[in-house]
Image (cartoon, grey):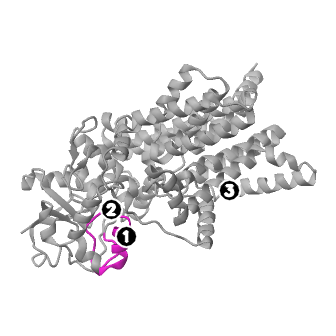
């Protein structure tokens, strides 16, 4: 009897072993962030300096659902320029404190990826679902923990869900499926993924209509329904793009015009390394496995004189899709190609159509999954080889020091603190935003919404703390304001050519720049600068309504620059010293 129970237990473990790494990771990640709270180390670039601060600003001004109002950064910008309220990710920030919302977003991203991948594979391989279950869940899990752009984590994780809904609709359309597709934009994002999903639907409609020798009406209807879903969920974005008529910085951004050789190098690099917003860590482990199998499998087809099977192999299609996205990424840097796209589709002027590469993390792990199921089909030994491969893939992602790998970075810096007896020169979430420090400053000066700028720190820190800023970071705002703000920073731009090119050719970061160093804004406790002078046009800053400058540097030419030091303030642990100046 005991032997029978042990056998049942062993069979259960072999069938459901994947539960342990998945649940174990989620509990560990949640536990670490619960224990350290806001003392966790969270990625700054395009994260704490951008979306997290914007969500907090919407909360500070109670503007999530408001219309016809401005939010207090970049001199006052329409609330419509910020993320829609009809988004599951945005809703987290409406309901929970910002740090809690951010961590819940990380955890939910994994759950969404697992559920989405399970639905898709069960639809594609219904008869094999039970046999493939461990690697279905584990592949979805690995895809879910990829260290991609946090604000669009749901959009990345839910892409298998979009594929599932479209396949189901193509095979057997129904009202509930169309309703689910209409609501899909709640977990997606139009300008990063949605527009390309719609484009892929068009390609699928053309291809399947030719294949089926009749119009693919279910997918044509799906295109309309999904497009309407995006319009409804992101109505603010569509209103800004199509009806406002304001010239924005997107119209004047300068994009490289590369030679054929440079484009080919670009294509190779993005194929190998991915894009920093969608770094799937594939090149370390997954890519070598996929390429070795891809080459060996196709050589085998040729050797066995079964070359026709090359055209029908799903893995080959996925690899081709990967290469296609990389080629599109490279062609974006060809001026003539961009001009052609903008001529055919004028509303797409300024759109980064090279974002097709954001689909590649999913495609790399889809390719890996196709290899793993073939190992599963080959026998029990190969099954356990497949299990080992997917577990190693998970470890590679978990242990990669990616800028968005918050759990790794938090553990790394806390271990560093334990071993060295002091904290690293990196700001954690609490230190970065320094809420207590800025609350003290605001109370001391009786702050009442006066326009301010940051020097030596991200304007997002001020925005998070309810301080109105003339500077800021946004990829979509008025070209006129960019030109007005340029007058403020012109003295610095004239001194550093690289900074001038950076601002004039892009301009999304309207910051006070150093007149000597490439950058004095960082996320460390120490500020590194070779020159403590500030180079600004104070009259232009006053013309914009500016009153205060919050600086991490004790400015050495303050009086000459038209500034008066009010006082200096230090956070309790010394991680920040803020020198507060006002314009004379």
- Residue 142's image quarter? top right
Q: CA distance from mark 3 to mark 2?
A: 35 Å
Image quarter (top left, top right, bottom left or bottom right) of the N terminus: top right
Discs 3, 2 touching: Cβ within 8 Å: no
* Residue 109: x %, y % from top left: 49, 40
Please give the count of numbered marks on the rendered protein.
Answer: 3
In this picture, residue 392 sits left or right of residue 105: right
Discs 1, 2 touching: Cβ within 8 Å: yes
In this picture, residue 55 sits left or right of residue 561: right
Secondary structure beneath dot 1 equals: helix
Q: Is residue 511 magenta?
A: yes
Residue at which label 1 appears: 502
Which residue is at a point 45% across and 32% down the rendered structure image?
Answer: 229
In this picture, residue 376 sits left or right of residue 204: right
Residue stretch in magenta: 495-520
Q: CA distance from mark 1 to mark 2?
A: 9 Å
Asked if one can make out residue 273 in the rendered structure from this viewpoint, the answer is yes
Residue at which label 2 appears: 509
Residue neighbourhood size for the residue with mark 1, other residues' Cα within 10 Å, grouped as few (<14), some (14–19), many (≥20): some
Looking at the image, which residue sits at the far front?
343
Secondary structure beneath dot 3 equals: helix
- Residue 66's image quarter? top left
Which residue is at a point 31% across and 36% down the rendered structure image?
Answer: 94
């Amino acid at each position: 009897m005991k032997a029978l129970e042990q056998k049942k237990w062993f069979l259960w473990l072999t069938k459901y072993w994947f539960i342990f790494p998945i649940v174990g990771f989620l509990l560990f990640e949640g536990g670490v962030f619960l224990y350290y709270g806001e003392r966790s180390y969270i990625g700054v670039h395009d994260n704490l300096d951008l979306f997290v601060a914007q969500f907090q600003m919407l909360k500070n001004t109670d503007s999530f659902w408001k219309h016809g109002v401005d939010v207090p950064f970049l001199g006052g910008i329409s609330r419509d320029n910020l993320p829609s309220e009809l988004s599951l990710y945005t809703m987290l920030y409406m309901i929970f404190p910002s740090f809690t919302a951010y961590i819940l977003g990380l955890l939910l991203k994994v759950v969404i990826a697992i559920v989405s991948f399970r639905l898709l594979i069960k639809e594609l391989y219904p008869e094999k679902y039970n046999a493939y279950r461990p690697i279905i869940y584990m592949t979805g899990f690995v895809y879910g923990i990829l260290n991609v752009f946090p604000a669009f984590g749901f959009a990345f994780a839910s892409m298998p869900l979009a594929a599932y809904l479209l396949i189901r609709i193509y095979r057997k359309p129904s009202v509930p499926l169309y309703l689910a597709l209409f609501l899909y934009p709640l977990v997606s994002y139009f300008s990063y993924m949605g527009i390309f999903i719609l484009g892929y639907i068009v390609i699928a409609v053309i291809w399947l209509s030719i294949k089926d020798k009749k119009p693919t009406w279910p997918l044509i209807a799906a295109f309309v329904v999904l497009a309407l879903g995006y319009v409804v969920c992101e109505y603010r974005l569509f209103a800004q793009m199509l009806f406002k008529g304001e010239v924005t910085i997107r119209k004047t951004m300068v994009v490289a015009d590369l030679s054929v050789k440079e484009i080919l190098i670009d294509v190779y690099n993005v194929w190998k390394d991915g894009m920093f917003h969608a770094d799937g860590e594939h090149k370390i482990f997954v890519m070598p496995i996929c390429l070795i199998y891809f080459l060996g499998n196709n050589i085998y087809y040729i050797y066995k004189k079964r070359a026709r099977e090359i055209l029908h192999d799903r893995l080959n299609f996925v690899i081709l899709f990967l290469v296609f996205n990389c080629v599109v990424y490279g062609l974006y840097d060809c001026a003539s190609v961009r001009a052609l796209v903008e001529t055919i589709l004028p509303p797409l002027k300024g759109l980064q159509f090279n974002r097709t590469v954001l689909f590649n993390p999913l495609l790399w792990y889809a390719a890996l999954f196709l290899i793993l199921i073939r190992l599963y089909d080959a026998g029990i030994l190969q099954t356990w080889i497949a299990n080992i491969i997917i577990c190693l893939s998970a470890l590679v992602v978990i242990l990669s020091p990616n800028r968005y790998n918050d759990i790794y970075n938090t553990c790394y810096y806390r271990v560093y603190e334990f071993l060295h007896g002091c904290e690293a020169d990196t700001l954690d979430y609490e230190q970065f935003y320094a809420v207590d420090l800025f609350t003290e400053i605001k109370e001391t000066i009786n702050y009442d919404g006066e326009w301010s700028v940051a020097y030596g720190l991200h304007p997002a820190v001020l925005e998070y703390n309810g301080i109105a800023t003339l500077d800021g970071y946004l990829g979509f705002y008025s070209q006129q304001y960019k030109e007005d703000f340029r007058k403020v920073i012109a003295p610095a731009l004239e001194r550093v050519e690289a900074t001038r090119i950076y601002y004039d050719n892009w301009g999304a970061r309207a910051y006070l720049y150093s007149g000597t160093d490439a950058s004095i804004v960082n996320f460390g406790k120490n500020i590194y600068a070779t020159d403590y002078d500030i180079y600004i046009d104070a009259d232009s800053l006053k013309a914009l309504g500016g009153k205060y400058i919050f600086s991490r540097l004790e400015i050495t030419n303050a009086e000459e620059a038209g500034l008066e030091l009010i006082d200096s303030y230090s956070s309790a642990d010394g991680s920040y010293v803020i020198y507060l100046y006002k314009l004379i």
